Image (cartoon, coloured by chain):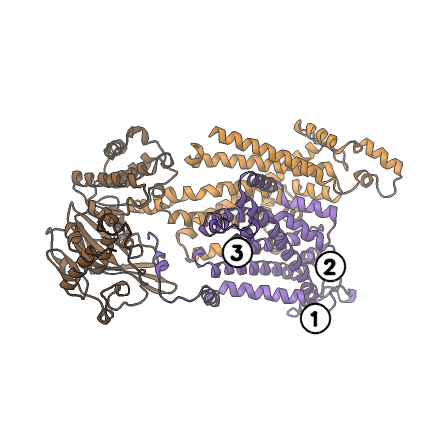
Chain colours: A brown, B orange, C purple
Amino acid sequence: MAQDKDFCGDPILSVRNLEVVLKTAVGELQATRGISFDICPGETFAIVGESGCGKSISSMALMGLLPRIAKARAEHCVFDGHEILNMSRRQLSGIRGNTLSMIFQDPMTSLNPVYTIGDQLTEVFLRHGKGNAKEARDRAVFLLERVGIKNASERLNAYPHQLSGGLRQRVVIAMAMMCSPKLIIADEPTTALDVTVQMRTLALLSELQKEFGLAIILITHDLGVVASLSDRVAVMYAGQIVETAPTRQLFADPMHPYTQGLIQCIPSYAPPNADAELHTIPGMVPALIGRQKGCAFRNRCALADGDCAKGDEILMREFGAGHGYRCLRSEDALCENWRSLQGEPA
Amino acid sequence: MWRYFVKRLGIALLVVVTVSIISFGLLRLSGDLAQNLAGEGATPAQVDEIRVLYGLDRPMLVQYFDWAGKAVTGDLGRSLFTDDPVFTLITDRMPVTFTLAVSSLFLAICVALPLGVFAAVYRNSWIDRLALGMAVFGSAVPSFWFALVMIYVFGVQLRVLPISGSSTWAHFIMPTVTLSTMVMPQIMRLTRGGMIEALDADYVKMAWAKGLSPTVVFFKHALRNALLPVVALAAVSLGFLLGGSVIVESVFSLNGIGSLAYESIKRADFPVVQSILFVLSFVYVVLTLLSDLINARIDPRIRLH
Amino acid sequence: MSNAPAPLDNMDLPMPSPRQQSWEMAKRHAGLQIGALIVLIALIWAIFAPLLAPSDPYVQDLANRLAPTVWQEGGSWEHVFGTDGFGRDVLSRLIWGTQVTMVVGFGAAVISGIVGTTLGMLGGYLGGRIDALMIFVINVKLAMPGVLIALSLVSIFGGSLLSITLILSLLFWDRFAVVTRTATQQVRTREFIAAAEVSGASRAWILFREILPNILNQIIVIGSLEMGIAILIEAALSFLGLGIQPPTPSWGILVSEARDTMFFMPHLIIIPGLAICILVIGINLLGDGIRDITEPQGRN
């Protein structure tokens, strides 16, 4: 498989065959099926997909924050030299917020309304024994200034409701940086923000990453965000990675019909002759109750035929370095499809 | 924040005035008070005499302002039955009811708060089921019956507790337990609900993601948010207990406000009844204001409004 | 999808209809079944009391006072729960007492539900001054000591079934109002209300055909809660002698009458008290159960 290749020799996070199963009233639901990827130090790896494709639940599994009805298992799931899935709660909490931190989707709700910004920032620093209260305060002021908040030392005494959404997300980002993490998982970090604020926040993340040499897992449904920020992309569909490639490569030669559809859906990527009509992928993400057979995308795919329903799962095929996809169609047929999608008016 | 409180205070005053009008008017619904006071066999002349004596011949509005004007200065009139000043009647009886209500609330909180927290943290565990079972039973058991059963078990069979009166602290045990069952289930449910909501909130996920210890996550991040509605409920409950102790006081022969109200209602002693209704409403309004102040201490969103 | 059940929203598998789902859940919901059974029995007792009661609940038999229950020494099947201090059959009085309990409880819940829901929906839908007035009225209501007001009113208007039902209705409308007000505020922002408004539907139509069905669920839960409380307060008032008047068999009166003999005949107190307790638990279980099966997301 393509992603088995070592990109950097020594990945900061290596995930093999991660499966998350939810026990629901209607039966066992396979939220993810055999997810594998490696993250190199300092790179941004984007996971893209529609809501319900399993991208957030995989990140929750990595953080050990799964709801009780969910169970995660994997061949291995190694972060910074430690196997994290079987870790005790105590060991895990030593890593969380320390070397591995997370940015949540909604800055309006991810800060505790009854404590000051300063309290919430310094708390994580003190928890992981990075220094005394004074050092924690200095670190907080330094990071708040770094993420572009003016009057940082005064802002420490502010409560979350006194800040705008964009500022709060900056606080959340600063909070994730408090202990100089090696990897940040950012779950839809800009979805809840205004469009104008989104771009600035993304730019900030990217600056911070270069400056501090962080690795970022960026979880998003927005390929536009992916294009502007990430080094490599995994496209998820129905609990599976259906295509993975370096970002530039993915946009240039998308192989999987789903990826092709997704890219086609970005307004700025649609060809100029598309009459300003937005492209959409027909149908919905299928339910994942019970064991799945064949390709999960077949019901929405223009290229599907009878073979797509057969077999346990579609295996990953390689198309160039670090580029893999799960589809039975020939390379030629897929490239042809992409060309026709681009050329033909929508 | 001060604007907020001035507004709250204004509304509270308006509520107090409205309540005083209602409790004043309520007892004049009962027909001709002068006739009631004079008794069955009184002649019309005697009834008229009484009407003038008690000022009942004046227009209703004049009577109200007369009463309200004096009430502001602490003069609540005199009992029609014993001729004692109502103010002293109430202040004499208040300590028993107040002790009872406060200790019941204290007991209820001491049991319900930890139970609610643990039920939420260990959802669907045995402790959650126990809490839920207690809440279901507590909100379904008639308090007068629960009191009688306790009297039978602890007072008669085991002979460990006194069954009536208020001379020692031991006399307050059973009344306190009985009364606390009236508010315990609500407090428990609200604590549990608030905790569950807080534990599902993003800021608690965030707290976990920061690697904080369970103790810090539960007690620092979740509980303080969960407590906000509980504070308001506790204040309301205290008001409710002060007015609802009538049943318990009756069963355990305690001479509190409740039994005073009960006796006065039975003998149509309207100055006493309307004053008790008014005083209890007043206390309730003060308590809710107090709970607002406490909540403002806990919640910066109110304080820095 | 930060919380787990989210993927379920996206299912396009053939799912059972909501009605079928509710039925499936009802079949597995023990609380609902127990609650329904208890309420059903109480209803049957109330409606068929003349047929079910073994003897006349009013006939005194002074020669046969304080007869023991069937499981006690000297008891007989003639008086399963024995007789009271006037020689009346306790089981018969218990069965007849269900009538008072159910009428007062159900009547108070329905009337206060209608009053409170109307006020709450009007406040929540119209907003502005009407809403502010509504909040003020609720505040005034909350500030009054309910039980004492009820006692005073009963002493003024007498302890008939009708007056007690009406007086208790007066006590409970506030919770309906608070809940329906909030629920209405939430529902009115949804698209289908805007659609109805745009299409020129009248306010009454919107309130009763569009909003009411959407908040009915919550009204039922409050209703079951208030019915239980109404039953408890009726029993308490009757126990204090300011409710239903003897010799009418109310469960509260049964307890009150047995007080004199409670030290040597505790079962006379325990039986009616347990009856109240079980019925109220049943009603609450039924209400919670109905909420659970009609609104699966609301469970926790």
Name the image quarter holding residue B93: top right
Q: Secondary structure at mark 1?
A: helix
Decide: is B152 above or below A294: above
> Which residue is label 1 attached to?
C51
The residue shown at (45%, 55%) is C298
Callouts 1 and 2 in the same chain:
yes
Residue A30 image label = none
- Seen at 50% across and 36% down, the residue is B292
Asked if residue A56 can be seen in this view, the reply is: yes
Q: Secondary structure at mark 2?
A: loop
C6 on left or right of B288: left
The first of marks 1 and 2 along the sequence is 1
Residue that sits furthest to the top in the current view: B73
Where's residue B27, x and y in %? 73, 40
Mark 2 and mark 3 lie on one chain; the one further toward the N terminus is 3
Return the residue at label 3: C213
Q: Chain of mark 1?
A: C
Tell me, yes or no, if residue C74 can be seen here.
no
Where does residue C201 sit, x and y in percent of width and height? 53, 51
**How far, Cα to Cα, is label 2 from label 3?**
39 Å
Chain holding disc 3? C
Q: Amino acid at mark 2?
A: Thr
Q: Which residue is mark 2?
A: C248
How far apart marks 1 and 2 lie (CA) works out to 18 Å
